[in-house]
Amino acid sequence: MAGTHEFVVPDEARARELARALAGYGFALVTAWPSDGDGWRVTALDEGPYPVDAVGHRQIEAVARAAAAIARQHDGYGGGGTRCDVSQLRVLRRPDAPIVATNPGARPPVPSVTVVAPPPPAPLPLAPDDAEDRPIDLSGLDDIPWAELEHAHGSAEDVPELLRTLADPFGNDWDEVLDELFGDDLLHQGDCYSATAPALPFLTRMIVSGALPARQRLDLYVWLLIASARWADGLLADADAALVQGRRPEPAGWTEAVHHTVGEQLPALLDRWETEPPGVRFVLACLAGSYPRYGRRIGDRVQAMAREFDGTRPGAYLLLAGALVDGRDDRALAIAADIVAWEDSLDPGWLDAAGLTAAVKAGHVLAEGALRALNAE
């Protein structure tokens, strides 16, 4: 495996300085071009090779973080990158760039990485289930000016009909409609839109109605957790640039409203703890950990569930949720670090992000990783 590491700097002079510094660090080819926006984009070609496994991914990400530290010394911040097979390197070479720095035959120092074996999975049953045949209250749905709001594909005027379709527990296209509404429209590729927050309270209405079976309620809880996590995701994505620019990290568009809206729904959802099966309680515990202000009311039950699943993958996330609910943020960050050591889909760089609280960083590990435990039976 190989790839690139990209950075943004304010001007041409600093682009030249950073290119030389990255080449000196060991990158064989570093190029820079004027950015489509402000500043210049500097790209370091990382020839590797790295093994195509969890160790290799951790190694190239560690090299990326080391390169980012160099970039910050030149008022630069991370701008993404690529990962590819070594055979694709020729496509990534751009020797015609306005700025080129080379160090043939060199490679950056490769850190030693140990990937810890994950704890075993554990089943999270969706029984017993208490769904009943009753109507779902969607009053007020048509009072929202959906045509004036937007989702990923333009006007949100189709949202009410999609929500009404979801409210029919006997419909045959539940999965398709849910994926269209959130995966394609309201949370497309993790982005939020003006229509995202107004739609979320109707998910809570569906959940608390008691009309949906556990599998469908679980789907809605999961989307609420995904939606709530976009706020921290945006803060982490902006942390590097904020540090260089001397400001606080800023959330991505609409994510703050979405995060706040999910929090407003949480009290009504927490009231369902005793009636929900373990699979749903697991996601509800993760939501509680994301909002300690509300979640502490079920702190003792989250802790009891963590003990029940001790030594398992879900148990690790429940332990993290319990620490966050109790306000033990430093403990939560330590638990999050333990999880990141074996959950190779999570970025260790989240734990080192500047300008963010331990609760935000640990909470992001909880929200992003817990769903993998849910599906790892």
Image: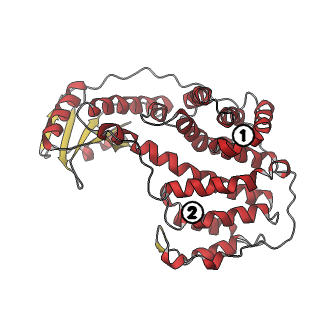
- For label 1, the residue is 296
Q: Are marks 1 and 2 in contact (CB under 8 Å)?
A: no
- Identify the residue position indicated by label 2 in the image: 197
- Figure quadrant of residue 316: top right
Q: Give residue 108's position: percent from left, percent from top.
A: 29, 25
Coordinates of residue 326 in the picture (x, y in percent): 69, 33
Colouring = secondary structure
Other-residue count near label 1 (Cα within 10 Å), few / some / many at <14 / 14–19 / ≥20: some
Q: Nearer the viewer, mark 1 or mark 2?
A: 1
The quarter holding residue 339 reads top right
The residue located at (61%, 67%) in the rendering is 199
Front residue of 53/151: it is 151
Q: Secondary structure at mark 1?
A: helix
Left or right position of 310 against 35 = right
Nearer to me, 100 or 13: 13
Residue occupying the point 12% across, 45% down: 98
